[in-house]
Image: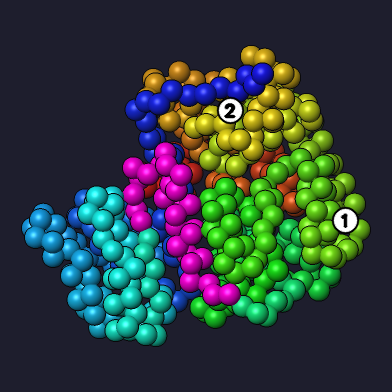
């Protein structure tokens, strides 16, 4: 019987620490692209602020619509004229235009295939993609980020050429090339691609020639299935983990799938294990709390830390995903009184855990506890493999030894609520 918690469906408390990689920032990773948001004024505020804070405002434009446009049915007819005006004003002609529509569009039922076909006929040198900015779909089978990943990779076309390369997908920020997987793959004669590293559209389109999609986040699950079916690129789920045994297992599975043999990586494994021991000795019994926005597998991390001797006190999540249920069950058997809180529950505004001295892995739990020791991490950014373990331990020790408030880090991260 699973003892993992299930949270009630209720009003959400969205703290200033909630968010991180919004649709603007993710879409901006598409090379040689421009975003056109077609929405009412209020819907554009969030994205506009995000574009400014993340330095991509020059990649974003807005076509504002009002009630008369909606009621008259003139809404979709405004888009082609808006695109013409946009292209005449841009200093560099984009290769891709992503047309973002808001929740309103889901109610109006716009025929985007026909609209994109019209735009493509008029501007054959540009690829048009429809993207949705619809928060009300958060609890559906295709929430915004999953839909956005699907839209981004939809421009890839099937290739008969296959190269010795793999695509890392789902992770918004590219894994640091300090990670040993890059050197292991390179020595084996293989290359690792990531959309965030591309500068030209041709580089991204070449992803179609890859032999495997390495899925680093659940958000890329749907797009990977579609690419397997339509492009013939198989996929392997390999979410970031800080369990050295799981990392070794992942690398062995990768070897088998690609038919290659990595150089001996036992030295990398030992460095990671030593880093965990060193951090545990340094931090001792000081309480550690974990935030689901910092790492995709908070329960797996909790098990790693507990087994190493850390004092794991609390985990903040919005749900327990299927791939984390086994780890959740294990940590509850080890720590029966472990606090598992719903980070989005409306009771969070009561700040029941304020002044609980702790080392916080992530912004949300750091904000709720007002911890003075917060790790600057969002969605495992840049961390992977044995390098990821070693780097996380360094971050833990640094946050333990120095004060870092969640408020300051939220500003630094450019989070917009």
Q: Label 2: state its secondary structure.
A: strand
- In the rendered image, residue 257, in percent from the top left (x then y), is placed at 79, 60
- The quadrant of the image that shows the N terminus is top right
Q: Residue furthest front?
A: 229
Q: Is residue 199 left or right of residue 193?
A: left
Q: Is residue 138 magenta?
A: yes
Residue 412: percent from left, percent from top: 46, 49
Instruction: Give the residue number, with chain letter if any, for mark 2.
Output: 315
Residue at screen point 39% across, 35% down:
15
Q: Residues within 10 Å of mark 2 (few under 14, many from 20)?
A: many
User: What residue span does the magenta drawing correspond to?
Assistant: 132-158
Residue 12, relative to residue 2: is it above or below? below
Give residue 366's position: percent from left, percent from top.
51, 33
Does residue 173 sit above or below 116 in this rendering? above
Up the image or down, 306 lies above or below 414; here it is: above
Q: Which mark is residue 312?
A: none
**Was residue 238 drawn as part of the magenta stretch in this picture?**
no
The residue at the point 46 percent across, 44 percent down is 141
Residue drawn 40% across the image and 26% down it: 9
Q: Which residue shows up at 61% across the image and 78% down it?
A: 159
Q: Are marks 2 and 1 in contact (CB under 8 Å)?
A: no
Quarter of the image that includes the C terminus: top left
Q: How many marks?
A: 2
Q: Which residue is mark 1?
A: 265
How packed mark 1 is, by other alpha carbons closer than 10 Å (few <14, some 14-19, many 20 or more), is some
Location of residue 117 in the rendering, given as x and y in whole percent from the top left corner: 33, 75
């Amino acid at each position: 019987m699973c003892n993992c918690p299930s949270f009630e469906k209720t009003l959400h408390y969205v703290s200033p620490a909630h968010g991180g990689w919004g649709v603007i920032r993710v879409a901006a990773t598409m090379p040689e692209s421009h975003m056109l948001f077609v929405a009412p004024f209020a819907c554009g505020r969030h994205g506009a602020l995000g574009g400014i804070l993340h330095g991509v405002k020059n990649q974003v434009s807005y076509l504002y619509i009002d009630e008369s446009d909606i009621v008259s049915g003139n809404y979709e007819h405004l888009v082609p004229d808006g695109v013409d005006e946009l292209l005449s004003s841009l200093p560099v002609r984009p290769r891709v235009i992503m047309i973002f529509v808001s929740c309103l569009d889901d109610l109006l039922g716009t025929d985007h295939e026909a609209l994109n076909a019209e735009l493509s006929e008029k501007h054959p040198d540009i690829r048009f993609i429809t993207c949705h900015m619809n928060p009300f779909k958060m609890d559906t089978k295709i929430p915004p980020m999953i839909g956005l990943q699907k839209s981004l990779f939809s421009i890839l076309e099937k290739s008969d050429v296959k190269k010795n390369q793999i695509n890392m997908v789902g992770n918004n920020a590219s894994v640091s090339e300090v990670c040993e997987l890059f050197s292991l793959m390179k020595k084996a004669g293989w290359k690792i691609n990531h959309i965030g590293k591309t500068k030209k559209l041709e580089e991204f389109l070449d992803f179609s020639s890859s032999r495997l999609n390495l899925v680093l986040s659940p958000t890329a699950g749907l797009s990977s299935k579609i690419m397997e079916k339509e492009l013939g690129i198989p996929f392997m789920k390999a979410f970031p983990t800080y369990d050295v045994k799981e990392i070794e297992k992942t690398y062995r599975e990768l070897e088998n799938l690609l038919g290659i043999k990595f150089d001996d990586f036992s030295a990398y494994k030992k460095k990671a294990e030593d880093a965990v021991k060193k951090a545990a000795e340094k931090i001792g019994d000081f309480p550690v709390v974990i935030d689901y926005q910092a790492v995709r597998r908070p329960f797996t991390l909790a098990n790693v830390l507990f087994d190493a001797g850390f004092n794991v006190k609390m985990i903040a999540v919005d749900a327990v995903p299927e791939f984390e249920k086994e780890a959740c069950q294990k940590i509850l058997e080890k720590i029966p009184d472990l606090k598992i809180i719903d980070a989005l529950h409306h009771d969070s505004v009561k700040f029941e855990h304020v002044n609980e001295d702790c080392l916080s892995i992530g912004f949300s739990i750091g904000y709720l506890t007002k911890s003075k020791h917060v790790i600057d991490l969002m969605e495992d950014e840049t961390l992977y493999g044995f390098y990821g373990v070693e780097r996380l331990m360094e971050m833990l020790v640094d946050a333990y030894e120095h004060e870092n408030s969640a408020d300051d880090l939220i500003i630094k991260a450019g989070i917009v609520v």
